[in-house]
Image: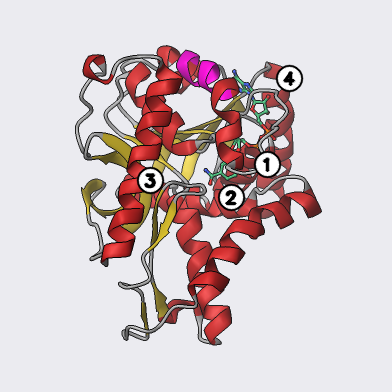
Amino acid sequence: MTPPVASVGVVGAGAVGQAVAGALVASGLCARLLVASRTIEQAAALVADLDDMRAAVASPVRPYAASVADLVDCQAVVIAVRARFSNTNATDMRMGGAQANAPVIRVLGAELRGYTGTVLMVTNPVDLMTRLFAEFSGCARVFGIGSNLDSARYRLTLARLLDVPLDAVDGHVIGEHGDAAVVCASATRVNGHPLPVPLQQVRDELATRPGRINAGIGRTRSGPAGAVVTALRLALGLENGLVELSAPYRDGWLGIPLRFTSGHPIPCLPALDDTEARQLDTAHTKLRAAYLALRGTPSSSLPIVRTP
Ligand SMILES: NC(=O)c1ccc[n+]([C@@H]2O[C@H](COP(=O)([O-])OP(=O)(O)OC[C@H]3O[C@@H](n4cnc5c(N)ncnc54)[C@H](O)[C@@H]3O)[C@@H](O)[C@H]2O)c1
């Protein structure tokens, strides 16, 4: 079968980059998969491993080691880099990478300046890094992976708690991919009906799940890879549908549901009750303040980024 997309790039050959690249080879989504990483040796090693997978499953996806500059002809680029640092945060774990990862994202933004394809940011804190990359690259189509992974975990958790099939649950987690995530409980439907969501149990699971995965296997990887592949299919116009991604919202960026039609996104916020609306305001204020602190720039001099 001919892959529907000509080429996709992945930057970062670590845990998430490996899982994303493996999922792309297995899915047959693109004809060429370009892998760039901190060193060409890392990229070449991952490409050799992916080539083995390609041969074993007869995938049409051909992997190549590449530099970041080589990715400009790709239809989409997935950024899953992580600077070397020790995370000392006891809470707000994802924010712990802001200072270390920001310089890497700025450099990538400069290297991909003027890129016209779709960029999916995975690097944490993802809502800040998505905005930073968009600002430094000038790219128009930049989306952050995070709220869609939270939403997948939410639906899975609720299905288990209520003992219903996963596809019976319709609900979103928006706001920050982090401690200020907003569970849209009031708009959640199970088999099309509203219900009282066991919020504390849901919150506890969302808060502890990544830590349990990290403790057991070192890094979360398959969940984010699945979230990337779904977002790619929608953003590249292979399917129409809704996905929760970090995108411009009011005068900041945070996770909101986007409805993609032929690759074109329209923000699509669910109805929120008063508590959820306040929580979304809190997430917005937190992320905006964190971004301004990271950027070290008065808000009046920040460029206006259009809503996708
Ligand atoms: N948004 C989400 O839902 C989500 C989920 C899981 C992980 N993450 C984040 O994804 C990022 C990657 O996680 P990981 O577990 O794969 O990390 P990792 O340490 O396993 O891999 C990071 C990779 O980035 C590469 N790298 C570092 N600097 C680079 C540069 N300047 N150019 C190119 N490559 C560079 C490293 O060589 C390494 O291969 C982290 O920030 C992590 O927190 C996000």
- Amino acid type at mark 1: Ala
Q: Name the residue under label 2.
A: 23
Quarter occupied by residue 85: top right
Task: Report x, y in % for residue 29.
Answer: 47, 48
Foreground mark, 1 or 4, reads 1
Q: How crowded is mark 3: few (under 14 residues within 10 Å), some or many (20 or more)?
A: many
Relative placement, left or right, of 236 versus 83 is: left
The residue lying toward the viewer, choosing from 112 and 128, is 128
In magenta segment, residue 162: no
In percent of width and height, residue 252 lies at: 29, 35
**Residue under label 4:** 41
Report the Cα–Cα distance between label 3 and label 1.
19 Å
Q: Please, what is the dominant secondary structure of the magenta stretch?
A: helix
The mark nearer the N terminus, 4 or 3, is 4
Bounds of the magenta segment: 101-107
- The residue to which callout 3 is attached is 283
The earlier-in-sequence mark between 1 and 2 is: 2
Q: Are marks 4 and 3 in contact (CB under 8 Å)?
A: no
As drawn, the label of residue 142 is none
Residue labelled with disc 1:
90
- Say which of marks 1 and 2 sits in front: 1
